[in-house]
Amino acid sequence: MTLDKNFDPAAIEARWYAHWEKSGQFRPERGDAEPFTIVNPPPNVTGSLHIGHALDNTLQDIIIRHERLKGKDALWVVGMDHAGIATQMVVERQMEERQDKRTNYTREEFVEKVWEWKEESGGAITGQLRRLGCSMDWSNERFTMDDGMNEAVLKVFVDLYNDGLIYRDKRLVNWDPALKTAISDLEVETVDTKGSFWHFKYPLADGVTLDHPDFRGQDFIEVATTRPETMLADMAVAVHPSDERYQSVIGKEIEQPITGRRFKIVADEHADPELGSGAVKITPGHDFNDFEVGKRAGFAAGEMLNMLDGEANVCQSADGLIPEEFIGLHRFKKDGVDGARELVVQRMKELGCLIPHVTKNKDGETQEHDAEPRTIATPFGDRGGVVIEPWLTDQWYVDAETLAQPAIKAVRDGSIEIVPKTWEKTWFNWMENIQPWCVSRQLWWGHRIPAWFDDAGKIYVAEDEAAAQKQAGEGVALTRDPDVLDTWFSSALWPFGTLGWPEDMVPEKPSPLQGRGLGEGESHDASDTPLSPALSPEGERERMVPRPGSDLERHYPNDLLISGFDILFFWDARMAMQGIQFMKDVPWKRLYLHGLVRAEDGSKMSKSKGNVVDPLGLIDQYGADALRFFMAAMESQGRDIKMDDKRVEGYRNFATKLWNASRFCEVNGIGASKTLRAPEAKLPVNRWIISEVTETLAALDKALGDLRFDAAANTIYHFTWDRFCDWYLELIKPILSQDSVHPEPVEGLDGAADRTSTSSARAEVDETRAVAGWVLDQIIVMLHPFMPFITEELWHSMASETGGRNYDLIVAKWPEPKAEIDADAKAEVDWLIRLISATRTAKVELNIAPGTKMTAHVRDGDDALQERIARQSSALDRVGRLESFSFDPAPEGATAQIVIDGATYVLPLAGAIDIDAEKARLNKALEAVSKEAKSLEGRLGNANFVEKAKPEAVEKARADLADKSAEAERLQAALDRLG
RNA sequence: GGGCGUAUAGCUCAGUGGUAGAGCACUUCGUUGACAUCGAAGGGGUCGGGAGUUCAACUCUCUCUACGCCCA
């Protein structure tokens, strides 16, 4: 099989992916090997692959392929998230299109329909991840609502409840009136919007006066608000306790003009004397701050007035004081129809209770407005897209503060390493100020909360109804809580729930050898309270540990988590909290946070802006390998990635380059290496490239170990292109050409070598083929994590003439060159490269055709140099176009002169030569060298430097100065020779 | 208001206590049988402003400015 002239990614990608997956190589049996584990952030079952997934999954695949090649038992757990709200919305939207709706069905029927949708249309993203080349363990693909995860969720809920870490509470929640469910703090996005600030007169009851002029026979206190509709449920007015203006009215009553409700003026620090009038209306049932003020004023949560229903339409409050005309109105203008807000303003105005906002126009005329324009930080639901309404309901809360403590500690003591480190502060800052996590959602799709109520409202939490009934006693009628859990509640269990928890937990045996982690050289101490779960009320629970030999035991903690920083709080932090609580150890040892992929202009990609780049389109255009390499090369820590198609194209070109280099090898009888170790080599160029491989490998391993994806990608890129293709392959051409006949058709190494003219030449050709084949193999292996498709293709193609490979590249062995760095060979080839480069430069600058063959007369050359030149004569001739060397002075006439390492190479020039051009050339070089020499001289002339600088620095400066001075002298001499 | 990040070649970005690099773009040249999705050579930066530490600062500290993000 010969390689096609053109590399076509599409032709190989699907084939190799199917082969890997079918042959089970994403997770080969390696029970004895050291485990390495990553769990994939489960994408929404409704989702499709966007550019952020491409980044996130490419990085994970690079790591997992690298670890697999290193022989580890590499497990990349994959699965999907049921995505409660998102999925329910998708299915409901489809129903709407058919003039149908959720409430036409029973809960069971609807949930059944969602499952049907999931089976038929869900999970498109899994095919797309395959196109990207991701080597996940599909054989154990999970779902956050599969049986195992359901079991885990139930147990976690029940245990947390029994430990007092989940509780039911009546308080204000963020209510999304579009979705008609509570959401968590994290799902609220605060957006600055243009709004209005209205000022009103609130009449003082019982003849109490301030210093205002008489008004309706009453005095008033001025209050201001951005949400006038809430005045229908006002329960107080607050003033700052030290605000002198209002001392006399604290404790006195207001008579609200619209509702007629009477309530008190209270002193509370929440009132800001600087803001508006300094007095603020208090609606405890519809504002988070007011809720706190209300509590301080002595209202129990149950007494706080509510004036809105689940869709944010006005409903009658408990005291029945809201006028009938308001009932049923939306909270504010919606779809062009005025709502309660507008009507409240109108009525207040009619009642003379609106204080107009007065401005002057540019002509100095005063103008009156109903309200003062104002920018308001408005909360929106991230899914529903409407303004969030603080609403007083009973919901389930997780005591996040308690769970956060060990997660804080884990990062603090290094049990979890966050990369890049700058995110630690964000972690601490959020965890230390964490609020109770509202986990109940008023949806149908999700994990139903395992709680039952009796008629008296008493709660029974248990893993099933029978157990709840047992708690309640026979004959007690129970009703199950209709709500489901937040999607993130289940995904928080991903690192252990997917590995067999809780099924694979067994009672801890007395043997101290059992179990892992805690108390045994780990940084956690079992006696350390923060890492020990709270005890259940009925006493100590049996201590459970992962069953020895189970996946759970081998793969928890995971080694690494890679996620975008945008889900640090949603997912990563909650995994840390739940993982430590239930596994008594951290979920992962390292947490790598990457940035966002932005549009070319740096803006955030969004559907509404229409600037979304489809990764699948890029794969079609450039190949998955190119897109992956782009992601890796652009991923530097702590920075977002700007999309750049040109760069993806560049990496497609890189793949093509490798393809063509392989073709070159193929036609020159270079095939797959027979050894893992570097072949024995005598020729400097071969010894040099082996050293280069060794250095590249070290740099690559270091970069990957440090999670420096950009450095890793650049290392292999430059080695392949600059060292291997541009120099090594060029330098070995003259060696290979000693093989007088081109192997045609290629007959493999032995047949080709037979035609070599002399035995020494034959040995050189054999050695070079062996080394070149070995180096190409190393490139293919080192590049595989980044570009899995082309490398697997080449891995097999390059071996097709020698009987094929015994195994696929995906499970091959990571390079172990076991070769020393050969300093002599490096020095020689380095010299060779510099001499050839300098010759080329001189030709261009002197307008000499590049192909012109020249003779070099060497000045100041020693025996060693003479030997070098002899060794490298064929490369100097063919690559450098220096066909002969003489150690005699150059003949009279025009010359170009090159100074390298203490020797001067004088190149006589045939015909007319522009002496001035050569002078200019040499002068330029002399200037550069002199400048450097002068700077070094200055530094060394500074007594402070010589005394205080590190000795190595002084040493190096001296050596550099000697080199530069010598070079300057030779350049000067060359100039002098030109006259 | 609190926190974080970023400012380096025309563009996108690396980088190190000892006077700067890559890719793309640009200029010139090029069919020496792997590759024009290429090769060779080259031009281009007072490393955002200011101050400090140091023998030495693009690199460390402070400060200012601009932009971005998160939280309140």
Image (cartoon, coloured by chain):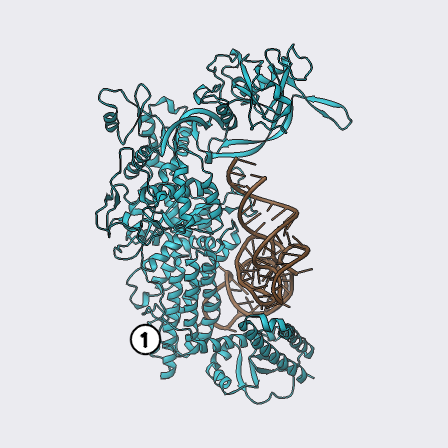
| Amino acid residing under circle 1 | Gly
Chain letter for the residue marked with disc 1 in the picture: A
Q: Position of residue A931 (x, y in %)?
A: 65, 73
Is A148 drawn above or below residue A278 in the view shown?
below
> In the rendered picture, chain B carries what hue?
brown
Task: Give how far across and how far down residue A21 sits, in percent.
Answer: 31, 51
Name the secondary structure under disc 1: helix
Answer left or right for A593 relative to B62: left
Image-based side of A877 in relation to A845, left or right: left
**In this view, A651 is above or below A258:** below
Q: Is residue A251 visible?
A: yes
Location of residue A902 (image quadrant) = bottom right
How many other residues sit within 10 Å of disc 1, few (<14), some (14-19) or many (≥20)?
few
The structure residue drawn at horizontal position 49% and vertical position 77%, both measured from the top left corner, is: A878
Q: Is residue A493 above or below residue A7?
A: above
Chain A palette colour: cyan
